[in-house]
Amino acid sequence: MGELLCAPFAAPASPRRQSKRSRTERRARQRRGHDPLVENKRLWRLVWSSCPGIGWQRLERLEAMFGSLELAWVASEAELTHALRGHTRLSTRELDGINRYRAEHGAQPISRPPSPTQRHEWAQPGRLLPDDEAFPPALLELDRPPLQLFWRGCGSLWPALWESQAVAVVGTRRPSRHGSTMARTIGRALAEAGWPVVSGLAEGIDAAAHQGCLEAGGRPVGVVGTPLNRVYPRHHTELQGAVAAQGLLISELAEGTPGRAGHFALRNRLQVGLAQAVVLVECPLASGALHSAKLAWELGLPVWVVPADAARVSAAGSNRWLSQGGTPLLSPMDLIHNLGAGPLRPRAQVPAPPVQANLLQREAALLAALGAGASLDQLCDRLRLNPGTLSERLLRLELAGVLRSEPGLWWRPC
């Protein structure tokens, strides 16, 4: 636990996936530095982020309508109701909850400048906001970005997560013996190759992947659907403690948040947002893991699928993905061969040839879409590019020794 709640890092310059909007916001953050106004804004976001009934859309609406969250705090009931209309409309119960929360913390929970007591109360360690340097920018591109992230464990893992340099392993809570064995083996192989292993700390596939990662001395990342001070299922107390000690625990739920089934579905989007690839080990037709695979596909991430017995109900959903574009994963080493060394594995100090290094950087999106192999038609669909443009780019990669072409207009990594 030596790195428990250690400070997050100063983020690197060029993430793998980052929109123009998030790049602009990041440059603005760097220019602002330690401006007192920035600290004040951050503290007010922390205050409002803990308010019952306030989510991402309502928080953004309040800031836009009042000009600042500080002014929104002293708004009347009528003003709040007017500001949060339409799809962000408050129910009477939600408005009462906001009023009780404001009364509990007084008319000015944050002063100018903030007092030491206020900083201690709100700016606690193990909490990230979207404007913080270490907040993974890929999470901002989700339909419902998290208002905040609570974390516990090795802060040194945030650089890898900031660049989505991790692999998510997902699947059913009730796997077959084959599924459990594969998940454990995959978790171990990823850890040995230096990849953080992201999963949800649920029973079944999640637990097996984390256990394999832990056994290999790797860094598991558990994204949970409960507050960090609560363990679910309860018999995972030891496993969750081991993940926090050796890796990282992450939740978007504050302590005291009541448990809801929907929280586990929302957690799935965070797992995908932190990952560079998703491995679907085994799941039935009705499974949260399928939502993770679908979201990964929509975000342009490769989805690997472990084939299983066609007659097995617990694998009907994952098997179906094999006909929907998922890449079959017959051996964990196929995955490692495709991904290469992870961010946590020491690398030989041998620089790549400048021309090839630049080419790989330019074609990162194409290589990610290619996965373990794809046809020209599949790549056109995934990247939404015409065949002529793609063929030229594939040829350059082939001439550089990065790809090899096969019959049927099919390409694979060398």
Image: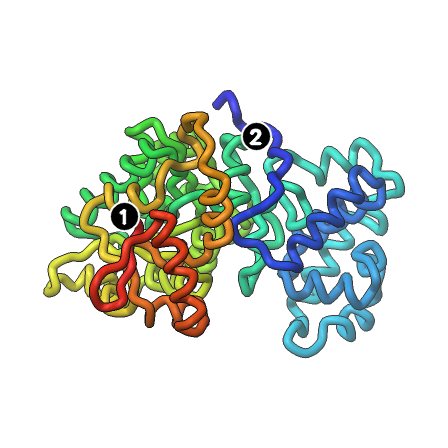
Q: Position of residue 258 (x, y in %)?
A: 51, 53
Task: Work out whether residue 147 or residue 351 is closer to the camera in this orientation and state it.
Answer: 351
Residue 226 visible from this viewpoint: no
Q: Tag 1's secondary structure?
A: helix
Residue 356 visible from this viewpoint: yes
| Mark 1, residue position | 205
Q: Residue at x 80, y 68 (%)?
A: 65
123 to the left or right of 315: right
69 to the left or right of 352: right
Q: Amino acid at mark 1?
A: Ile
Q: Are marks 1 and 2 in contact (CB under 8 Å)?
A: no
Outermost residue toward the top in this view: 2
Task: Work out whether residue 33 or residue 347 is closer to the camera in this orientation and state it.
Answer: 347
Q: Rounded to the nearest whole Å, what is the CA distance between mark 1 and mark 2?
A: 27 Å
Colour treatment of the image: rainbow
| Mark 2, residue position | 5
The 10 Å Cα crowd at callout 1, few under 14, some 14 to 19, many 20 or more, is many
Task: Work out whether residue 88 or residue 316 is closer to the camera in this orientation and state it.
Answer: 316
Label disc, if present, on residue 389 of the rendered structure: none
Residue 213 vertical placement versus 304 (above, below)? above
Q: Residue at x 38, y 48 (%)?
A: 400
Corner quadrant of residue 112:
top right
Q: Amino acid at mark 2?
A: Leu
Residue 284 vertical placement versus 118 (above, below)? below
Outermost residue toward the right in this view: 112
Q: Tag 2's secondary structure?
A: loop
Q: Position of residue 16 (x, y in %)?
A: 52, 49
Residue 376 vertical placement versus 39 (above, below)? below
The 10 Å Cα crowd at callout 2, few under 14, some 14 to 19, many 20 or more, is some
Q: Residue at x 74, y 46 (%)?
A: 29
